[in-house]
Image (cartoon, rainbow, N blue to C red):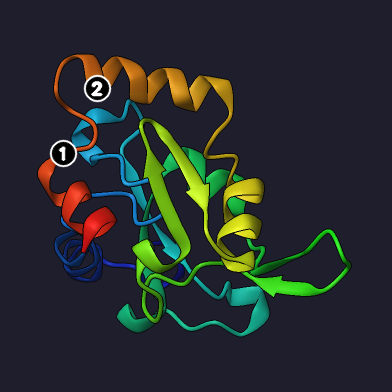
Amino acid sequence: MADGINAEIRLAVAIRADYLCEYCLIAEEDTFFGCQVDHIISIKHRGETKVENLAYACAFCNRFKGSDIASLSESGVLVRFFNPRIDRWLDHFQLERLSIQPLTEIGEATTRILRVNNIERILERQELNKVGRYPNNAALTRAKG
């Protein structure tokens, strides 16, 4: 039990997310490494281990996000990342075929730092799409409202 994330909390976060990565919308069952519980505001930034501060993230999104909570825009402005507890996915991103396109500065900072459109991740979504697994119905609901 790392950082107070017990089985009960993990299950609550997973169910709330429909077992999807809340950043790239890949289903946990379609990932080799599964999904992890992410502190949206990391502990080192005084984030708490409460379900309100936790997101479900695939291993890649979680790894690239790390403890970061924001990034600098091209103009040098500090922009926070997408927060699945207060933001709607479709307000900040658009699924264009298999690419996740940012619609806002928040979306741009998040897609860039989480590297959701790296070629390897696009290829993964492409292979899943060929067998009807990406986006799944839960992902489409989040992507289209």
94, above or below 17, in the image: above
Quick one: label 2, few (<14), some, or many (20+) residues within 10 Å?
some
Q: Secondary structure at mark 2?
A: helix
Q: Secondary structure at mark 1?
A: loop
Quick one: label 1, few (<14), some, or many (20+) residues within 10 Å?
some
46, above or below 30, in the image: below
What is the three-letter code of the residue carrying label 2? Answer: Asn
What is the three-letter code of the residue carrying label 1? Answer: Asn
Residue 77 falls in which quadrant of the image?
bottom right
What percent of the width, then of the height, locates residue 113?
66, 49
Side of 17 relative to 23 (left or right): left
Side of 84 relative to 117 (left or right): left
The Cα–Cα distance between marks 1 and 2, rounded to whole angstroms, is 9 Å
- Total residue callouts: 2
Side of 47 relative to 15 (left or right): right
Q: Quadrant of the C terminus?
A: bottom left
Of 104 and 110, the residue lying toward us: 104
What percent of the width, then of the height, locates residue 59?
44, 40
Q: Earlier in the sequence, mark 1 or mark 2?
A: 2
What percent of the width, then of the height, locates residue 1?
36, 62
Q: Which residue is mark 2?
A: 129
Q: Which residue is mark 1?
A: 136
- Please name the residue shown 78% across and 63% down the image: 73
Of 49 and 114, the residue lying toward us: 114
* Residue 44: assigned label: none
Q: Is residue 19 visible?
A: no
- Please name the residue shown 24% across and 29% down the image: 30
- Please name the residue shown 44% across and 56% down the image: 93
- Please name the residue shown 31% across and 37% down the image: 34
